[in-house]
């Protein structure tokens, strides 16, 4: 009987902890969404499929080594060169692709970039990996402080991407991370 009670108590504690984590996640999600005026969307691992499954796939690149960052840039250039005539705009998009792809290699191990055209006429760049994930407690610092890093890096990449793109979507867990960003087609 005592063993049974102990097991029930453990289950109640773990259930409460799960509820607390979900409540904290929702607060982060809502506050970041409001502060960024709807530009940054934090979603859970189930919701992310609504954003990654949508649209028409234009290209995909596996990111395994530094050389693949160059390949991701090359393929991105091919996709964007006809839709964005301005050199500056293309360079900015390429910079975002470099930063997100480098983050995969630096913080997660191998991953993939998928480029899609969404139904609301944006290009969506989706970066997936199976790394250790991003602690959501770091998210405000990553977005709003230039120079925040968990490694001995500059900590500019995430903030830079956020400042350039039209929309950013993030889902992260200890099983991996998906960072997606949208560039509205003109
Ligand atoms: N794909 C990822 N998986 C796990 N953690 C990540 C991932 N991308 C970013 N991070 C975390 O977010 C932090 C901020 O990323 P950011 O790109 O801004 O800085 P950095 O990569 O550390 O430095 P820099 O980009 O200037 O070289 C990283 O230090 C890392 O902890
Ligand atoms: Mg980086």
Image (tube, helix red, strand yellow):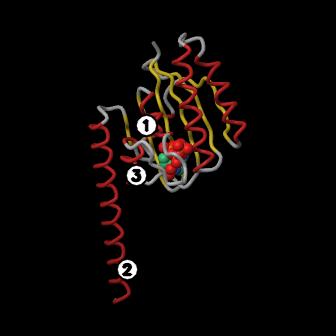
Disc with the residue nearer the chain's start (3 vs 2): 2
For residue 136, which numbered disc appears in the image? 3
Determine contact: label 2, label 1, CB under 8 Å: no
Q: Report the mark closest to the observer, 2 or 1.
A: 1
For residue 7, which numbered disc appears in the image? 2
| Badge 2 density bin: few <14, some 14–19, many ≥20, Cα 10 Å | few
For residue 169, which numbered disc appears in the image? 1
Q: CA distance from mark 1 to mark 3?
A: 13 Å
Q: Nearer the viewer, residue 29 or 145?
A: 145
**Residue in view at x 63 percent, y 26 percent:** 59
Q: Report the mark closest to the observer, 3 or 2.
A: 3
Q: Position of residue 161 (x, y in %)?
A: 47, 33
**Residue in view at x 70 percent, y 40 percent:** 66
**Residue in view at x 56 percent, y 37 percent:** 99
Q: Nearer the viewer, residue 8 or 92?
A: 92
Relative horizontal placement of residue 123, taking residue 70 as reference (left or right) = left
* Rendering quarter of residue 13: bottom left
Disc with the residue nearer the chain's start (2 vs 1): 2
Give the position of the N terminus as an image quadrant. bottom left
């Amino acid at each position: 009987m005592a063993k049974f009670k102990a097991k029930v108590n453990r289950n109640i504690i773990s259930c409460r902890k799960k509820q607390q984590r979900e409540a904290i996640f929702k607060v982060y999600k809502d506050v970041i969404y409001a502060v960024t005026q709807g530009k940054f969307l934090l979603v859970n691992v189930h919701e992310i499929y609504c954003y990654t499954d949508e649209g028409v796939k234009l290209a995909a690149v596996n990111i395994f080594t530094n050389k693949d960052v160059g390949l991701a840039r090359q393929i991105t250039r091919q996709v964007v060169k006809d839709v964005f005539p301005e050199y500056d705009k293309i360079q900015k998009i390429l910079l975002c692709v470099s930063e997100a792809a480098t983050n995969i290699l630096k913080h997660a191990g191998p991953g993939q970039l998928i480029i899609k055209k969404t139904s609301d006429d944006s290009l969506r760049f989706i970066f997936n990996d199976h790394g250790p994930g991003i602690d959501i407690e770091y998210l405000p610092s990553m977005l709003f402080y230039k120079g925040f890093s968990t490694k001995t890096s500059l900590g500019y990449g995430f903030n830079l991407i956020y400042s350039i793109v039209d929309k950013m979507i993030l889902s992260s867990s200890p099983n991996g991370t998906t960072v997606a960003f949208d560039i509205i087609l003109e």
